[in-house]
Image: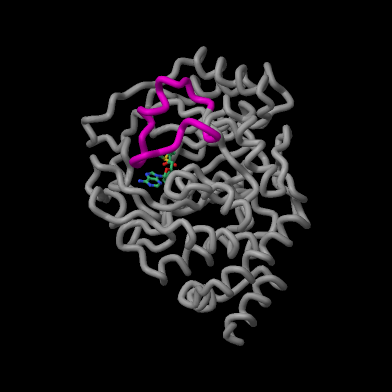
Amino acid sequence: MNEVTKKLIDKLYNTSSLEEAEYLHLINNRTPEVTEYLRSLAVEVRKKHYGNKVYIRGLIEISNYCKNDCLYCGIRRSNKLVERYRLTEEEIISCAHVGYSLGFRTFVMQGGEDPYYTDERMCGIISEIKRNYPDCAVTLSLGERSRESYERLYSAGADRYLLRHETADSCHYSRLHPSELTLENRIDCLNSLKKIGFQTGCGFMVGSPYQTPENIAKDLKFVETFSPQMCGIGPFIPHKDTPFRDFDAGDAEFTCYLLSIVRLAVPTVLLPATTALGSILEGGRELGILSGANVVMPNLSPEDTRKKYSLYNNKLSTGAESAEKLTLLKEKIAAIGYEVVTDRGDAIKM
Ligand code: SAM
């Protein structure tokens, strides 16, 4: 291995920090040998903090209505071919009920930005889940809301909030989103969430249209400095009914390489092996875990809605990706030497 590259990896391992230009060096000098070295250190660090535990989150996709028009996303408002749905409060609670009996202790409510879910409605759902399952964590992934709204959701009992920053470069951001959405507001939201006290998650897509290695170096530096409790990194996958239909999907192995880097930059981060990663590569979920990830998010949504929450083509929602097949998931994870646990799986404080 190139001496400079090894020194940089050792610096990252020892200090959890690199300059943006140094991250760029790692991005541009990816070889099988470098990948393996990074991977082995990432696994060591993850094991130090979390042993061989893999945390599961029950994903409830509450609505595919969205007022936004992100160019990459299958449920963007301009996509008239989507069959829209939204779950009722009772349906959401019943998903949590099924999830609890399967062993889930975190429920992630994710959806498009659907104005139907007012603060009042969301707070009602959150407090009901917390009342029924006080030993569970509630994670929200409902996009950009006002600071006051985030405060209300937190007061109602929500513990965590996932809001990927998508890209830390404002020019790149403006190529992925319509002009009413800005990186500035996204970052303001993330800062508010953290200040309020949420365990907060940022993240980005790998291989999104127009993304450059410099953009990714910026993402890595952003993740390092923001120091989130969670970080969602998955490959971009085109959706046939979006303007990005003809772009290539991101690369699964490169995604795993970045997971290893993020594990070293934020050692205690809760890092999912995403559904997108599992969707583009057979065994992608396992490769993610072997690269430093420690979270998987099986789908708890009602079966008939899963196909409708189509962010990208060929999204997995059956097999080990579905909550009902937890035994299969456990077996697959056990086969690579890890253990799926029934645990809230909160982030460890450094
Ligand atoms: N509306 C909320 C938000 O904006 O954070 C949550 C739902 S949004 C659909 C969840 C994530 O899906 C986004 O943050 C984005 O990174 C990812 N996503 C959307 N379209 C995608 C695609 N075509 N390929 C891969 N990931 C995608």
| Span shown in magenta | 300-321
Quadrant (top left/top right/bottom left/bottom right) for the C terminus: bottom right
314 in magenta = yes
Residue farthest bottom in this picture: 3
Q: Position of residue 228 (x, y in %)?
A: 60, 53
- Provide the major secondary structure of the magenta segment: loop
Residue farthest top in this picture: 90
Q: Is residue 98 visible?
A: yes
- 224 above or below 112? below
Name the residue located 73 percent from the left edge and 62 percent from the top edge: 44
| Residue 174 falls in image quadrant | bottom left
- 97 above or below 330? above
Name the residue located 63 percent from the left edge and 55 percent from the top edge: 290
Q: Classify the position of ligand 1 by quadrant: top left, top right, bottom left or bottom right.
A: top left
Q: Is residue 225 visible?
A: no
Q: Position of residue 256 (x, y in %)?
A: 53, 58
| Residue 6 falls in image quadrant | bottom right
Q: Position of residue 324 (x, y in %)?
A: 57, 24
